[in-house]
Image (cartoon, rainbow, N blue to C red):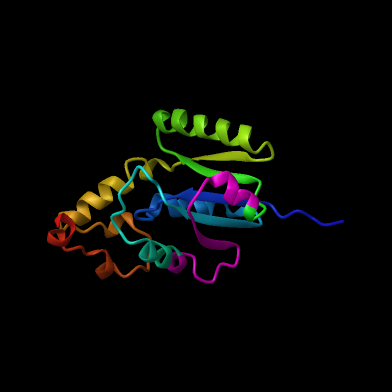
Amino acid sequence: MKIMQKIAIFPGSFDPFHIGHESIVRRALPLFDKIVIMIGYNANKKSFFPIENRLKWINQVFQGNDKIEVKLHDGLTVDFCKLVDARYILRGLRTSADFEYERAIAQVNKKMHTEIETVFFLTLPEHTPINATIIRDIVFHGGDASIFLPKGLDMNEFKVNSKNLNS
């Protein structure tokens, strides 16, 4: 009899991946055999950092941890779950507004793929105000966002020439 691995998908655009994301993944590790961080393409968002950079940065954060994989996907999260035999979707909640939004998505995902369960982790209190939009704004205006980013990343890669972004 084949033993099913407990595989979770942690989907997002991760533009950029920050310490709140890292915390959710690290705290969820004991619950799953593998966590696949799925960098998705969001049609409603214009990317700030190139997807290749985001892939590289997340791999750097979890380098040497064989329970974590990072993959790109252009499509529905439930389709990706089927592709990698995942039965869990991991999501972080910062606020009650996050809950309402994530609950609706979880219910639609469940309807589309009945074997999928969504697991919610509450953000640590110190990470509640952190979000990618604020980090992008700090970087865009030449500020130092390093306190919001995982340790070990080359901060020079986060420096952006705002003139190039406006063209």
In front of the other: 128 or 51:
51
In front of the other: 112 or 11:
112
Query: Which residue is drawn at the image coordinates 65% and 38% (left, top)?
Result: 113
Which x, y percent locates residue 52? 38, 66
On the question of residue 44 being in view, the answer is: yes
In front of the other: 20 or 70:
70
- Residue 43: in magenta span: no
Q: How many marks?
A: 0
Q: Quadrant of the N terminus?
A: bottom right
Which x, y percent locates residue 30? 62, 53
Query: Which residue is drawn at the image coordinates 41% and 68% (left, top)?
Result: 56
Please identify the quarter of the rendering in which residue 128 is found.
top left
Query: Which residue is drawn at the image coordinates 45% and 28% (left, top)?
Result: 100
For residue 101, above or below residue 151 = above
Which x, y percent locates residue 160? 20, 63
Taking the view exactly as shown, the residue that stands out farthest to the right is 1
Which x, y percent locates residue 22? 45, 55
In front of the other: 79 or 29:
79
In this rendering, would 51 be left or right of 4?
A: left
- Residue 63: in magenta span: yes
For residue 131, above or below residue 111 = below
Q: Quadrant of the C terminus?
A: bottom left
Q: Which residues are magenta?
A: 59-82
